Image: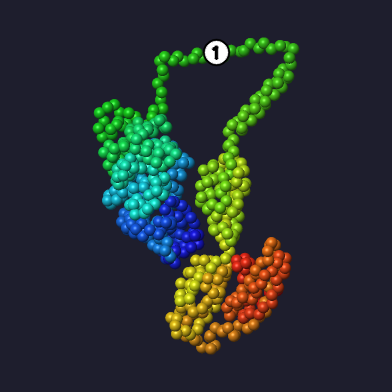
Amino acid sequence: MIGTIFRIRYELIEQIDDGPLFSGYKARDRVAGREVCVRVLKRPFADEPGFVERLRDVVKRSSVIQHPGLERLIDLDDHEGTPFLVSELPAGLPLEERIRKLAPFSPAVAVGLAMTIGQALDAVHGAGMVHGDLSGRNINLTPDGKTKLALTGLWETYSASRTAGAAVLPGMAPYLAPEITGGEMPTPASDVYALGVILFELLAGRRPYSGDTSVSVALKHATAPVPSVRAFNPGVPAVLDEIVRKALAKNPADRYPNAKALMADLRAVQDALRFGKSLAWPIKDSGEEPSPVAPSVIQTADPEVKPAPLRNPKTRDREVNDSVPKWLLALVYIAVCALVILVSGWVYWNFTKPKLVRVPNIVGLSLTDAQKQLESAGLRLKVGRRLSSEKQPADEVLATQPPSGAEKRVGGDVLVDVSTGSRFVDVPDLRGRTLDEAKAMLANVNLQMDENVRKARNRNIQEGRIITQVPDPRSKVERSTRIRVTISGREEDRAERPPTEGDLGTYSFHLRFTVPDAEEPIRIKIIMTDGKGSKTIFDEDRSAGEQVEIEEEGAGPEATFRIFFDGELVNQVTKRADEE
């Protein structure tokens, strides 16, 4: 869909996300002169009126919440039957990607990130809403270290669809509070639970629960005991570990009731880390001996362990046979050292070099899906050639180097050839449209309008609207082809009137080509488009190797020839009369 212009306003530039419900694109808003995010609703969800209306209501209510930590929703619109959501363009990378690459983070950094997420959640809770789908994939980490929450309140739409809940469950399961799995509705306390999972990830570099299926993960959230972050990262302060435990409490009554309550404890930890203070748990009622927030780096000596006596340096007794020359001993010593270095290097190389993995078969997949497949195998995708294809749609993988099944080191590059789609497109029906509307429709399919627009009187067509076009509507032409149009209008003075078809003159055109190899004769059809319009000038069966040669007269000095093999457009040639 790259290059598509939605509602004659939003030009899709680059795909940035592909989720279960939406395909996300970076787009240029031609009216406002800015870049935005356009999320195109996938099918079958786009064909469910109840789901779309519920989504429209959520967007309307969410758009009034103003906070720098929330992605601003702008509008829900429709383009030729396809609903799409317009929002602020997210900056940076998804938080789950940063966690996968950099976690575990230091306690100070983890607490700081959790605070920025909590502040945005507090704005959502203060507006009487619940985020409901908080996860690392719906949070972006901006280049300045801030976070932005996306798709606030979208959970409210899932019940209006037959399949949306099942589609999003795999992504939601690792963050679902136990009461949600039990059938209750999301609340501010369930948002706190999801934030507790994220804080656990930031500190431990992994989620608190894992499983083979989304159902098994949800079951562990409901029944398994809350693990300690310190079991995976001993550098986490004991008080911070208790905060995570409280955020992940099974019973909502034992949990922080909302983001504001959680932030109060996180802020106390943040201040203690910053100024070197000590805290006890519970933070607000410290009746026990304070435990240090930051782990001590000074260890007291064990009284039972006695230090090893210092070796008294003495000259070693050299019991070397005087009959062995010193230079020979030196050579032997150098040879042994070299052998040790060589063996050590060989062992290091063979035990530390990346392991071999097989290249998965990604031919036929979209570029996004292919990248995910390679990343799961530990490989990187690198785009090589971009080739036109009459069978594969745009952004689909045509071939890989090395091929599927070949072995490649983890972290290596796989070069892919990507389809740019067909060279040919269907000409839209421009009749009855204004020139501006027609130009937008042509640009949408990479066609152009001829600058020489003709006028003709027509009682049935409103003035300024298109009467006829060349080539005809729904005919196939090559991208970038110029479409000539005639609009309704009053005739100008004879001196200023554009030339009519009779004024174009008659020119001779020569076309010649050889029929390619084929087992059966090919039905060859050639349509010529000149100043008068389109007409078929050749329609015969020809065998492989035969030469087709045509001399044809046309109106105007330029003509376009479209060549069809067995009904399929295979080539388009534009010729001028003064060319050979």
Q: Where is residue 579 in the image (x, y as percent from the top left)?
A: 68, 74
Residue 498: name its quadrant. Answer: bottom right
Residue 301: name its quadrant. Answer: top left
Relative side of 221 to 491, left or right: left
* Residue furthest bottom as drawn: 494
Relative side of 377 to 10, left or right: right
**Count of number-bearing discs:** 1
Q: Which residue is drawn at 61% across and 73% down?
A: 527
Q: Can residue 146 be seen in this view?
A: no
Crowding at dot 1, Cα within 10 Å, few <14 / some 14-19 / many 20+, comes out as: few
Q: Can residue 40 be seen in this view?
A: yes
Mark 1 residue type: Asn
Q: Residue at x 45, y 14 (%)?
A: 306
Q: Answer above or below: position of 153 versus 4.
A: above
Q: Where is residue 24 in the image (x, y as percent from the top left)?
A: 45, 55
Q: Residue at x 29, y 45 (%)?
A: 184
Q: Name the residue under label 1.
A: 312
Name the foreground residue: 378 vs 223: 223
Q: Position of residue 485 (x, y in %)?
A: 52, 77
Q: Residue at x 37, y 46 (%)?
A: 134
